[in-house]
Image (cartoon, rainbow, N blue to C red):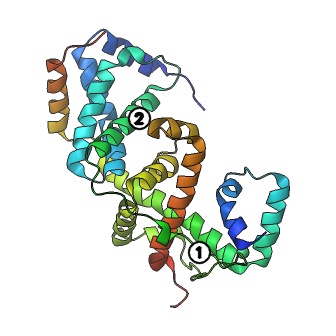
Amino acid sequence: MTCHDALNFLDDYLDGNLPWGQRLAFGLHLGLCRPCRDYLDGYRKTIEASRKALSEQAVVTCEQLPEEMVQAILAARSQTPHIE
Amino acid sequence: MESSISETETALVAALRAGEPAAYERLVREYGGRILAVCERLLFNKEDARDAVQETFLSAFRSLDSFDGRSQFATWLHRIAVNASLMKLRTKRRHPEQSIDELLPTFQSDGHRSNPGSRWTNSAAEISEQHETQQLIREKIESLPDSYRNVLILRDIEELDTETVAEMLELSPGAVKVRLHRARQALRTLLEPIFGGSSK
Ligand SMILES: [Zn+2]
């Protein structure tokens, strides 16, 4: 397995979807290859950091919808007939 | 995992179907904040997000009859919000998409990476502590081309499965997987200056 192959297996590896043979080869490659270990580490951190960055934003707005939006939505609803 | 609708949700849906105004208001107040967050994550623009929220609720009111109670009501609403946001994105797709090829790793003929880069010494938690860094990461995500960013957000942030995302974006599951991998790799390259600490 080359580094190129290893990187292509990253998502399946992280999802636990690699067949055992490939998982073994992937693990062996990682054990011997520092650049791939570093790549995997950064890859994981990328996923985690993007999750945090966007859920942090969610926390700010998540609590409640601004009152004028609530009113606008309810007003718009009363203007559109309910479609059966 | 709860897979079916709760009693409170059943009561709410029944009241909505009966056309009780108080139920509509309760729905908007109860789920509005969460829906706004979903739309903001996909649209990166407050005004567009507000439009999408409005569209989400109107569309939900219109299609209440299609809610069959097999999934949770919140899940059903979440999907409508994602679809409304994607629709909004489509109507305002800006310039032609840029290629992300230059953000992907390159390899030598022997399969080794051409430019291995530095080790990331900080943890994601450390990096995420600072408000400014969080903002910077959001800007990097936003800078990805729509077709990659959407897959990344739907899979990694909204945590929808590959099949659902494929259906929403009218792609094959295989195409979703390829785009997710490329999007994560491109974002990794973009975040490297923020994380890369080995030169310190
Ligand atoms: Zn390697």
**Residue at mark 2 to residue at mark 1: CA–CA distance:** 38 Å
Tell me the kind of residue under disc 1: Thr
Q: Secondary structure at mark 1?
A: loop
Residue type, mark 2 in image:
His
Q: Position of residue B197 (x, y in %)?
A: 52, 84
* Image position, residue B105 (x, y; %): 57, 72
Residue B124 shown left or right of residue B51 in the figure:
right
Q: Is mark 2 within 8 Å of ligand 1?
A: no
The answer to which image quadrant residue A56 occupies is bottom left
- Secondary structure, mark 2, is helix
> Is A60 placed above or below B128 here?
above
> Residue at the spot x=70%, y=60% of the render?
A9
B124 vs B109, left or right, is left
Chain bearing tag 2 is B
Dividing the image into four quarters, tell me where ligand 1 lies: bottom right
Whichever of labels 2 and 1 marks the residue nearer the N terminus, that label is 2
The residue that disc 1 covers is: B106
Q: Tag on residue B78?
A: 2
Q: Is residue B122 left or right of residue A59?
A: right
Q: Quadrant of residue B27?
A: top left
Q: Classify mark 1: residues with Cα within 10 Å, few (<14), some (14-19) or many (20+).
A: some
Could you tell me which residue is drawn at 45 percent across and 71 percent down?
B190
Q: Position of residue B156 (x, y in %)?
A: 51, 51
On whether disc 2 and disc 1 are found on a single subunit, the reply is yes
Which quadrant does the N terminus of chain B fall into? Answer: top right
Residue A15 x, y percent position in the rendering: 67, 51
Q: Is residue B31 above or below residue B122?
A: above
Q: Residue at x 42, y 21 (%)?
A: B9
- For residue B196, say whether it is visible: yes
Occupied quadrant, residue B88? top left
